[in-house]
Image (spheres, helix red, strand yellow):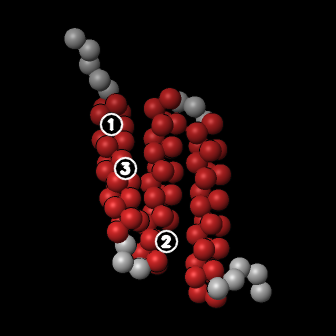
Amino acid sequence: MTTHAPLDYALAFGFAAFALALLMNLVRLLKGPTSMDRVLAADTMVINVIALIVLLGIHQATKAHFEAALLFAMFGFVATVAFCRFMLRGRLID
């Protein structure tokens, strides 16, 4: 019989919670009545994926996952700003 550390239980709960949140965001992305709802769902999906990457880094005890999460966060932010600017003005560059 093996015993699990409290961290294992917390990581399992975190993986399950963020995976469920990712699925709910996917539903909103596909079903969203407006394009802005879809943009917000996509941005929230980026945040949930970043959380899953960080949890994976904690689980595997590596630093590479944290750097990947940081890069993913930067690209996700820039993509969201660019898409919102395109939706508001119809162009990206003034």
Which amino acid is tagged 2? Answer: Val
Image quarter for residue 91? bottom right
Give the labeled residue for mark 1. 12
Query: Of label 1 and label 3, which has the lower sequence position?
Result: 1
Please provide percent x and percent y for residue 25: 37, 61
Give the labeled residue for mark 2. 39
Tell me the residue at 22%/11% (across/down): 1
Please provide percent x and percent y for residue 79: 62, 66
Which amino acid is tagged 3? Answer: Phe
- Disc 1 versus disc 2: nearer the observer: 2
Please provide percent x and percent y for residue 93: 76, 81
Query: Of label 2 and label 3, which has the lower sequence position?
Result: 3
The secondary element bearing badge 2 is classed as helix
Tell me the residue at 65%/59% (across/down): 75
Tell me the residue at 41%/65% (across/down): 29
The secondary element bearing badge 1 is classed as helix
Inter-mark Cα distance, 1 to 3: 10 Å
Give the labeled residue for mark 3. 18
65 versus 93 height, above or below: above
Residue nearest the viewer, comparing 37 with 3: 37
Q: Is residue 20 left or right of residue 52?
A: left
Which amino acid is tagged 1? Answer: Ala
